[in-house]
Image (cartoon, rainbow, N blue to C red):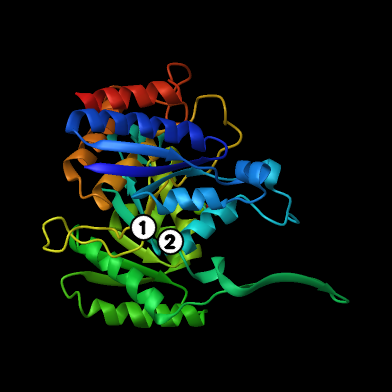
Amino acid sequence: MDIRIAVLGGDGIGPEVTAESVKVLDAIERRFGHTFSFVMGACGGRAIDEFGTPLPEETLDIVKGSDAVLFGAVGGPKWDDPQAETRPEDGILALRKGLDLFANLRPVKVYPQLIDASPLRPERLDGVDMVIVRELTSGLYFGKPKKRWTNSRGRTAVDTLTYREREIDRVARVGFEIARLRRKRLHSLDKMNVLETGRLWREVVTEIGAEYPDVELIHMLADNAAMQMVTNPAEFDVVVTENTFGDILSDEAAVIGGSMGMLPSASLSAIPKPPNSRRPRRAGKRALYEPIHGSAPDIAGQGVANPIASILSTAMMLRYSFALEDEANSIENAVAAVLADGLRTPDLATTLGGAIGTSDMGDAIAGRVRG
Ligand code: IPM
Ligand code: MG
């Protein structure tokens, strides 16, 4: 296959980890005989510095001319002034909205080799394997009005939480389709006890559920889910929820496995279909893959960031955008193998000393992929 990938490294550790992903994709290319071409684009804070905008026109053109986007991370203290006109995060938000990437898949897996690095007791980690499906293009992030003003009573700010039926419908279907391929259990999280949007959410998800009688649907309040996720994480298979709850809960779920540095994500513009279905497992022409961790400015430039979340994001890319299941598996197996070999970046190391850097971890995984 001839595949064009837009690489937007962004800020902080973003460019460091995406460089390792490119390394691993080079190894895939050689082993499986594909041709990948990579086109780099500016995004985030560095793009603000250079072009005055976090998502320059040229970057958008690169994205539009590509088959998929590999994204790093954006943001940092340099651009954190609350009064700033434009923020690095506006770049990724504009991409999500502009490409209609409504479904964000965040798989949470516990590697047996990393149990020591988890903040939870080992007995709670047995059987933990879930996918959070986060709605990504609506809710508080994008609702209008969104503004602040000052008058005689002081300063006021407003964000708006809106959900339309079709927005809930399509992301719920993603949850059900994925649950169908797994343990056939879907938790849908909302705050129907307080929010009007939560009541609509519950109603619509229940209706879609009737089309998926083979999937067990469990409604849960989002705050309760936050508690269950650390007391009983193995209960969850697929979790579908709105944008803000998904943002918060996926950070919580991410550390269950030991480090946020391990969690990949896929942002899709269509409902993925199973590989054996007549309809190809296409994620839509537009899709973006990024680690869920941020730009980690505190460790940027030191060569110590864990590249695994980004590397696993490329496995999701091969699977969801290009239906290259064997290639995706070979990356995931390579990651498991280097962990079994005892290789650890500092975020995963439980003892002082012996940890390896970003580039060595990338080399080791690429080496395993080449076989
Ligand atoms: C995430 C991040 C983003 C979000 C930020 C960087 C805008 O936290 O992808 O989870 O809030 O969605
Ligand atoms: Mg987040």
Compared to 298, does 175 lie above or below? below
Residue at 42% x, 39% y: name it. 39
Give the mark nearest the N terminus, 1 or 2. 2
Q: Is residue 324 toward the left or the right of residue 148 in the image? A: left
Amino acid type, residue under disc 1 in the picture? Arg
Q: Nearer the viewer, residue 23 or 194?
A: 23
Marking on residue 325: none
Element marked by disc 2: loop
**Residue 186 location (% of width, % of height):** 28, 66
**Can you name the residue that lies furthest to the top here?**
354
- The answer, for residue 303, to whether it is visible in the render is yes
Q: Nearer the viewer, residue 246 or 316?
A: 316
Q: CA distance from mark 1 to mark 2?
A: 6 Å
Callout 1: 10 Å neighbours few (<14), some, many (20+)?
Answer: many
Residue at 18% x, 33% y: name it. 32
- Write down the residue under mark 1: 286
Residue at 29% x, 48% y: name it. 128
**Residue 167 location (% of width, % of height):** 40, 74
- Write down the residue under mark 2: 99
**Residue 144 location (% of width, % of height):** 60, 75
Q: Is residue 159 toward the left or the right of residue 273 in the image? A: right
**Residue 264 location (% of width, % of height):** 38, 45
